[in-house]
């Protein structure tokens, strides 16, 4: 349905240039392959293969130059516009709201339970420098400004213009009734910039799923409530030492690198876990 | 050290594995003096519980001596003789503070897995699949015990290991099942299964004031133990119409409470229902065989209670929900909140009100564990309860 309505609206506005739906690196590859095919086709233009080559090559060239792909639009695929990554999670814990708030407000604590956050360094004027890594991938950095409007109730932040990945978030803290402690609600939006770097960043950020944030919150809750996050990493089993069970390398954090980073975080938490 | 490892369906092997180490500040390392094979271990052995991995160390019933403690352990000391509850609890979360210890929020490292299965994750359990944390179990020479201060029961008097070992699981499990029946004077309690948990449930129902307890099983030795615990019996190998038997014996009133101490691997006596569940579980259309549960719901008197200490893990078919609703039954179940019962039950053992060691029929070394699983599963040689000396 959406594809149909898109083509109708395109037809209704023939002079408006359609938005590209092919990412920059893909366009470059299309132009190169298109040129080769067209060249081959022109050299062998008497044969059927040659004719087909020039036809396909022409289409590839057009796709590369205009950034529009008919096949993509028919399939509803768009690799040019990076996806906005949005996560929303909640967690209850048996600690007073002020204590929970203070732990979050001290941003240096965040890498202790947020696996993809490598470090947060507070700088002058309410700005902090974040280093984020979604494994496997490069470290992304940026400055964020804390908007701390409601002390004890809410912490929100937004990245400054220089950030490689535009990111905004909010954590709300509410008193739960009748001695049920504190409820926290986290919303984070990552908006990668448009362009090839943005596409790559978006791809990496897809690793930050709601499930992963939930695991982060779960560790946060366990450290604050119980003094430690549960683990079985390093316990004995009848397996050869290098063969860990399947789910321990494919937890929602994904992959070996994330697993190792997680273990490092877990041991860091163990060192300073009790508050 | 030597440890009994799950190696596949119907395959347990003793392996030489590294000794456990302290991994968290609340941990203790316990040198096991006595462990047991639980009826629920047979569900793992028979492949009814998913997420077991080859090499997982088995065993959630064990006791021993503390040989090392983590930095945050205060109450428990090196040298203490301790019995360990099978669920691991943090002592601080919403559930622990309500004494719902087996529902602890903070002890399952694979909570995400359990959430997918059950909506919310319950506590970690020793040696009981990765769904409940993948913790190495106690059918081994040493075991790591997280949150030792919260769970470990220190037993420093002259009681023998065999008298106190079962405080970690099956005695509280049977007791909690009987307590859930809210027994009043004159009550009749029917108990499906005269294995260790069913026997302790029968014994506890008597202790809690039941007028009559009727145990239901097909194994002669078990029925004999039930009679010794003060119960009447129904031998299903001779009379398969349990519901009618219970109706007759209560002059048409029906039992006030029914306890399903069998769980997901019930052997159906009705040919059709038995075959139905066997086929459906074989082709994975049904994960559990709920024969005892169906009978318990059907047999229970109007307004009565059905209490379920037997383990269920997944889905069951043809459960008489209509009977539950129309008769206004109360259904209770769940993994045992062992921490809640250890102290009071230790006192009952000290006062000689109960000696749980009466269920033990087999004593083996760690090397004999694989064979013991086989014997226990086949109920050969009068096998009711196996204890293991590492």
Image (cartoon, coloured by chain):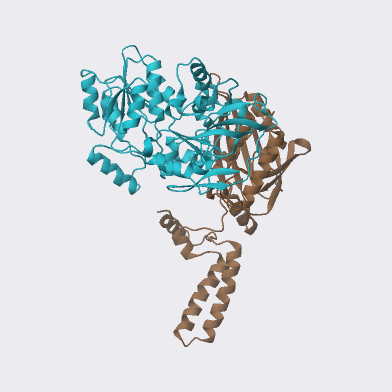
Chain colours: A brown, B cyan
Residue B70 appears at what percent x and percent y? 68, 32
Find residue B313 and report its image quarter: top left
Q: Nearer the viewer, residue B122 or B388?
A: B388
Q: In the rendered view, tell whether residue A179 sits above or below residue A243.
A: above
**Residue shown at 72% from the left, 37% from the top:** A108
User: Which quadrant of the figure contains the N terminus of chain B?
Assistant: top right
Residue A79 appears at what percent x and percent y? 54, 58
Q: In the rendered view, tell whether residue A199 sits above or below residue B185.
A: below
Residue A65 appears at what percent x and percent y? 57, 68
Q: Nearer the viewer, residue A271 or A32?
A: A271
**Residue shown at 68% from the left, 54% from the top:** A138
Find residue B173 and report its image quarter: top left
User: Which quadrant of the figure contains the C terminus of chain B?
Assistant: top right
Q: Is residue B214 visible?
A: yes
Q: Nearer the viewer, residue B123 or A88?
A: B123
Q: Is residue A93 visible?
A: no
B233 relative position to A251: left or right: left
Residue A116 appears at what percent x and percent y? 64, 45
**Residue shown at 49% from the left, 86% from the top:** A45
């Amino acid at each position: 349905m959406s594809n149909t309505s898109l083509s109708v609206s395109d037809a209704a506005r023939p002079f408006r240039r359609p938005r590209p739906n092919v990412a920059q690196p893909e366009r470059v590859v299309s132009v190169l392959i298109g040129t080769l095919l067209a060249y081959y086709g022109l050299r062998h233009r008497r044969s059927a293969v040659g004719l087909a080559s020039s036809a396909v090559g022409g289409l590839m060239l057009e796709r590369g130059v205009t950034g529009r792909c008919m096949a993509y639009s028919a399939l509803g695929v768009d690799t040019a516009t990076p996806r906005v990554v949005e996560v929303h999670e909640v967690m209850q814990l048996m600690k007073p709201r002020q204590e929970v708030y203070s732990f979050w407000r001290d941003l240096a604590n965040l890498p202790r339970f947020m696996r993809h956050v490598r470090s947060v360094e507070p700088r002058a004027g309410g700005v902090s420098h974040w280093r984020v890594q979604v494994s496997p991938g490069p470290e992304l950095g940026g400055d964020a400004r804390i908007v701390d409007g409601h002390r004890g109730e809410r912490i929100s932040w937004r990245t400054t213009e220089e950030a490689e990945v535009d990111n905004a978030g909010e954590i709300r803290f509410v008193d739960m009734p009748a001695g049920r402690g504190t409820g926290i609600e986290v919303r984070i939006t990552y908006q990668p910039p448009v362009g090839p770097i943005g596409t790559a960043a978006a791809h990496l950020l897809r690793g930050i799923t709601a499930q992963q944030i939930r695991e982060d919150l779960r560790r946060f809750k366990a450290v604050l409530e119980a003094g430690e996050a549960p683990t079985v990493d390093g316990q004995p089993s009848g397996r050869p030492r290098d063969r860990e069970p399947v789910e321990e390398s494919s937890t929602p954090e994904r992959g070996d690198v994330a697993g190792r980073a997680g273990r490092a975080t877990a041991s860091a938490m163990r060192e300073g876990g009790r508050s | 050290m030597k440890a009994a490892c799950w190696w596949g369906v119907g395959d347990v092997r003793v392996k030489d594995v590294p000794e456990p180490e302290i991994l968290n500040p609340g941990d203790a390392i316990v040198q096991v003096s006595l462990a047991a094979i639980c009826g629920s271990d047979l569900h793992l052995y028979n492949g009814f519980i998913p997420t077991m991995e080859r090499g997982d160390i088995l065993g959630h019933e064990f006791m021993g001596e503390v040989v090392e403690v983590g930095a945050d352990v205060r109450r428990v000391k090196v040298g203490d003789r301790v019995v360990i509850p099978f669920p691991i609890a943090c002592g601080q979360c919403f559930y622990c503070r309500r004494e719902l210890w087996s529902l602890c929020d903070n002890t399952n490292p694979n909570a995400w897995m359990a959430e997918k299965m059950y909506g919310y994750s319950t506590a970690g359990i020793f040696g009981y699949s990765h769904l409940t944390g993948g913790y190495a179990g106690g059918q081994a020479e040493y075991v790591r015990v997280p949150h030792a201060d919260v769970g470990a029961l220190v037993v420093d008097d002259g009681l023998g290991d065999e008298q106190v070992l079962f405080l970690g699981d099956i005695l509280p499990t049977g007791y909690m099942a009987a307590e859930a029946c809210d027994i009043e004077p004159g009550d009749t309690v029917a108990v499906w299964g005269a294995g260790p948990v069913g026997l302790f449930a029968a014994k506890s129902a008597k202790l809690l004031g039941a007028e009559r307890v009727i145990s239901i099983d097909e194994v002669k030795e078990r029925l004999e133990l039930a009679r010794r615990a003060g119960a009447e019996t129904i031998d299903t190998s001779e009379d398969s119409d349990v519901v009618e038997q219970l109706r007759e014996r209560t002059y048409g009133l029906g039992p006030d409470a029914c306890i399903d101490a069998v769980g997901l691997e019930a052997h159906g006596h009705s040919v059709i229902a038995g075959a139905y569940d066997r086929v459906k579980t074989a082709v994975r259309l049904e994960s559990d065989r709920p024969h005892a549960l169906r009978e318990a719901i059907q047999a229970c008197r109007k307004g009565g209670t059905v209490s379920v200490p037997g383990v269920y893990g997944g889905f069951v078919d043809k459960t008489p929900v209509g009977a539950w609703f129309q008769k206004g039954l109360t259904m209770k179940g769940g993994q045992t909140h062992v921490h809640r019962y250890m102290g009071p039950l230790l006192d009952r053992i000290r006062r000689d009100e109960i000696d749980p060691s009466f269920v033990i029929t087999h004593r083996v070394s760690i090397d004999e564990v694989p064979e013991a699983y086989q014997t226990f599963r086949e109920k050969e040689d009068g096998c009711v309860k196996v204890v293991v000396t590492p």
